[in-house]
Image (spheres, coloured by chain):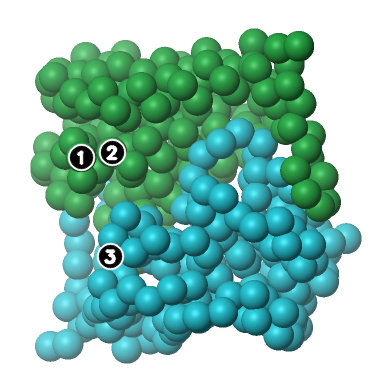
Chain colours: A cyan, B green
Amino acid sequence: MNDKVPDCQVSVLRLGHRLVRDARMSTHIGLVARAFGAASLIISGTDDETVDSLKRVAQRWGGDFKIQYTKNWRETLRSFDGVVVHLTMYGEPIGDVMPKLREASNGRRLLVVVGAEKVPGDVYKVSDYNVSVGTQPHSEIAALAVFLDRLFMGEELNNIFENARIRISPRPRGKGVENLTA
Amino acid sequence: MNDKVPDCQVSVLRLGHRLVRDARMSTHIGLVARAFGAASLIISGTDDETVDSLKRVAQRWGGDFKIQYTKNWRETLRSFDGVVVHLTMYGEPIGDVMPKLREASNGRRLLVVVGAEKVPGDVYKVSDYNVSVGTQPHSEIAALAVFLDRLFMGEELNNIFENARIRISPRPRGKGVENLTA
């Protein structure tokens, strides 16, 4: 049982990306990964549009988020030195798993595997944890966000993104944006 | 300050839906709304594909989730009898707002407004709360999921969906599905 925010570097592995059809979904996966405290996104398959769009956001909004490709996600999974978590509606409830997962991942790397509609059976076997964010069908984007929000206990939303060109000043009405390049 | 799960009926209003381009995104918005405890989705604009796909899920997986159209979202907003929350990266931090929002929405209806890329300025004015889920660009799907997960304090994932045809039996490996129609 561990109720402290784990000190772990998170990467997100996006499986099943099918180029054009999934470009926006994968872009959202990448943006969520970055905004909720992951250090990098690994996309299975090549897609310049998604990668370019994520890189533009990262340049403008700061931080050190990395985007990589893999041509062999099975090898990426097998060779990963750390804890592998597969998000799936068939897995163990997030509320049950999270305390032990925080403990297991503390001081280690964590790979969060996010699939598309059909995920090959061996992903379930090679993962250390299969974790469900509810047992109803919804969205891999939502599952990733809630998983990271619970892993980091909300503190990820206070992260500072270094070298940003712009930054938002929160307010109850309207939009406040600071230009940091002046 | 209120740290109890509010007793409130949540509707989600999806603005800026642009038919084909947004069908998958709006479908995910609807699925997230349903899976994370909202009672209904209101889509601004007509899109049979999105609505049909959501209805098919709701029939198969149970529950009483409603999907409606509006041709005049400004009227929907103005005439809403309850608390209106607009999710926007420019708003007040969710961590600051949530305790007072739980209190304000207890025993009332809550409308969560989720925009597309550009949201008209009057949405900021007519909303009771403009709430940010982090100040980094990410995803309206993610913002909605995290918002509802925090509003309902994780309890929404234990909701029972009545009259379901299938149901998942969570497990550490593989897939467990119960067929409830036999």
* Among the 4 quarters of the image, the one containing residue B157: top right
Q: Is residue A4 visible?
A: no
Q: Residues within 10 Å of mark 2 (few under 14, many from 20)?
A: some
In-front residue for pair B160/A36:
B160
Question: Pointer 3 and pointer 2: residues touching (CB < 8 Å)?
Answer: no
Q: Secondary structure at mark 2?
A: helix
Residue matched to label 3:
A169
Q: Where is mark 2, residue-wise?
A: B23
Q: Is residue A39 left or right of residue B52?
A: right
Quarter that holds the C terminus of chain A: bottom left
Is residue B157 visible from the viewing direction of this image? yes
Q: CA distance from mark 1 to mark 3?
A: 34 Å
Foreground mark, 3 or 2, reads 2
Tag 1 near tag 2, CB within 8 Å: yes
**Amino acid identity at mark 1:** Val
Give the residue number, with chain letter if any, for mark 1: B20
Residue under disc 1 on the same chain as residue under disc 3: no
List x then y, in percent, for residue B17: 20, 37
| Crowd band around label 3 with a 10 angstrom C-alpha radius: few (<14), some (14–19), many (20+) | some
Up-down relation of residue A152 to residue A172 (above or below): below
Q: Secondary structure at mark 1?
A: helix
Left or right for A98, reference B21: right
Q: Chain of mark 2?
A: B
Say above or below: B55 vs A122. above
